[in-house]
Image (cartoon, rainbow, N blue to C red):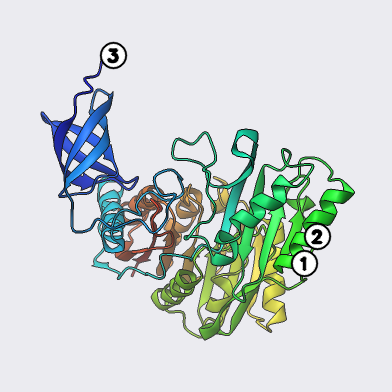
Amino acid sequence: MNIDRTPFELQIDDLTLEGQGVGRRDGKACFVEGALPGERVRVVQTGRKHNFDTARLEAVLDPAPERVEPPCQWFGVCGGCRLMHADIGLQRVLKEKSLFETLARVGHVQPERRLAALVGDDLGYRRTARLGVKYVARKGGVLVGFRERAGRYLADMHDCPVLHPAVGQRIDHLRALLTGLEARDRIPQIEAVVDDAGNTAFVFRNLQTLSPEDLDRLGAFAETQGVQVYLQPGGASTVAFHAGPRSRLQYGHPEFDVTVAFEPLDFIQVHALINRQMVRQAVALLAPESDSQVLDLFCGLGNFTLPLARHAGGVLGVEGDTMMLERARANAEAQGILNTRYLRANLDDETLADADWLGESFDRVLLDPPRTGAAAAVAALGPRAIPRLVYVSCNPATLARDAEQLVHHHGYRLEAAGIMDMFPHTAHVESMALFTRV
């Protein structure tokens, strides 16, 4: 297919969550990486599909007022962020648009009221990350970071302003450490996490047993940097502490007098401030009373379970991961929270409706599913007509799908919904919705 490479001008009218400006040429949509709504740009066509074309941005002729200088020198090469060239306010407007349009298009629902966006710092916020590692001889050593936008190679980056500084400002230190290891080409990734106190842990995925010399180098790095180093030779169960300060990793919800202890590979929310706001809002929307019985599905470590227990008569946390449940139970016991129970169950099982525990008298439900949503849980819960249900979502499409079931098949109202800007500068849209039934 021959493509005319002659530059042409294009007026940009819209923006996708992936950071592509959208214009029309002879009535056909054209997607341009890096262009913003309201801009007149000069582009060169790069691709042609039946319904749309793609083009490369050559120059911004009339910049939009929302265009900003990206606060990261690797933006445009690194694939971690897609929207850093747009003002943070425009980013949030775009995410709200994505949420409410998806609810309308997929779920055929709209909230009776829109919740104010939950917002926080947009730099230095990311306290968990999986960093790729690759030894590239022609680059002079090991690369550490995120993949390039094309997705095949790691970006040649030396820091990251989106990551918590305890991680983002140590990328060069990690590169130097790994370049000096004998196993430099046998460590494919590092999991990094930072807790509320700044305690930092790095989990090195080692594909082969490390030599004594490499173990010593990792130990020296842990001591000089003041970080915890773990090794992971196999699955998650093989993670073992190696060196560094043996500080307990934990984060808190101070207004609920709750602390959540966790291990380095446990799932925790990436943005500490948004997480606190999210839990506060969820508790307020559920409005538990002293005799309320709350069902917390996909409860994990007890991020919602423990704060809810401070206001409810009892909370049952249900989760599929046995280790997470054990830590949730331990967190409750350590803080004298005696009105919680924990149960392991496959919440994606189509036979979930037959579970005995679903027959208990719950008057509040909290759902915090993965990106695949909570189809089985919604099918099991819907006929039970529990009065208040809060759904925390990381995928507008599955939230909309499940909302359609709750509203149009189970008699619920979508009373409120809004975004939570958990991942600024990225295409991720996190949201919360309140469903009620009289």
Residue under pointer 3: 1
| Residue marked by disc 2 | 219
Q: Residue at x 48, y 70 (%)?
A: 275
Disc 2 marks which amino acid? Answer: Gly
Report the mark closest to the observer, 3 or 2: 2
Q: Which residue is mark 1?
A: 223
Tell me the quadrant of the picture where the N terminus can be found: top left
Q: Which mark is residue 72?
A: none
Q: Is residue 217 above or below residue 114?
A: above
Q: Residues within 10 Å of mark 3 (few under 14, many from 20)?
A: few
Q: Secondary structure at mark 2?
A: helix
Find out whether the residues at labels 3 and 2 contact each other: C-beta distance under 8 Å: no
Q: Nearer the viewer, mark 1 or mark 3?
A: 1
State how far apart marks 3 and 2 are (Cα).
56 Å
Image marks 2 and 1: residues in contact by CB distance under 8 Å: yes
Q: Along the line of sight, which residue is nearer the eye, 118 or 319? A: 118
Which residue type does callout 3 highlight?
Met
Q: Answer with mark 3 or mark 2, whichever residue precedes in sequence.
A: 3
Q: Give 120 or 382, whichever is nearer the viewer.
A: 120
Residue 159 point in image, percent of width and height:
53, 56
> Is residue 110 toward the left or the right of residue 311 in the image?
left
Local secondary structure at mark 3: loop
Q: CA distance from mark 1 to mark 3?
A: 58 Å
Location of residue 69 in the rendering, given as x and y in whole percent from the top left corner:
31, 57
Instruction: Residue 179: name its quadrant.
Output: top right
Disc 2 to disc 1, C-alpha distance: 6 Å
Task: State left or right for residue 209 relative to residue 409.
Answer: right
Residue 348: x %, y % from top left: 55, 48
